[in-house]
Amino acid sequence: MDVDLSRLEPVLDHYDKGDGSALIHALQDLQATYRYLPAEGVKAISEHLQVPLARAYAAATFYKAFSLEPQGRTLIQVCKGTACHVRGAQLLEDELCRALDIEVGGTTKDQDYTVKTVNCVGACAMAPLVIIGEKYHGKAKATRLTKLVTEAQQVSKGGSDDEA
């Protein structure tokens, strides 16, 4: 996959050369720019911050928030903490994967959506919980997921942001 390295320059310019303490922040910025951590970007950050490439990859693979694979424009997360699990999180996950024709951790062919699970987001009173983009949907029901995803897509393309 070809990566437009010109988009990397502002990320690198934000950090002082040799400042290894900025590694996590630089990786976060890299992921925000590309929606994943392209190998070329990780290598450039490693060189710029003067940290071993192995250390950069150790951080990139240790934190679940980072991805070495391209992610969809909208991240959909299903909470699988105990409260959400007991209240039907698996049904939500199954319905999302069926509706989007992907597996957990996968991205739709059009690069619109990535579905992931999270262990707990600390909103147990709202269980089961699905996060679509930045919006939390508590007491989610499998029968409403398609509508929530469609509404999220409209919002991301400049449409209405009505409460679902």
Image (spheres, grey):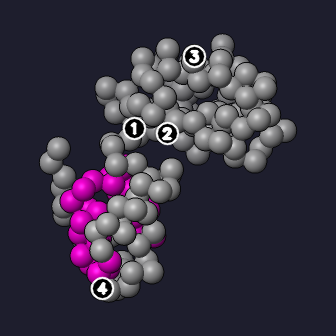
Give residue 75's mark: 2
Pointer 2 or 3: first along the chain: 2
Reading the chain from its start, which is encountered first: label 4 or label 3? 4
Residue closest to the eye, 37 or 133? 37
Q: CA distance from mark 1 to mark 3?
A: 18 Å
34 in the magenta segment: yes
Asked if residue 62 is among those painted magenta in the image, a careful observer would answer no
Look at the numbered disc 4 and give the secondary structure of its residue. loop
> Residue at point 45% right, 68% down?
24
> Which residue lies at the image location 58% right of the left edge and 45% below the top edge?
134
Using residue 50 as the reference point, say whether residue 22 is left or right of it: right
Say whether residue 25 is visible.
yes
Q: Which residues are magenta?
A: 25-51
Residue 41 location (% of width, % of height): 26, 62
**Amino acid type at image mark 1:** Gly
The majority secondary structure of the magenta stretch comes to helix
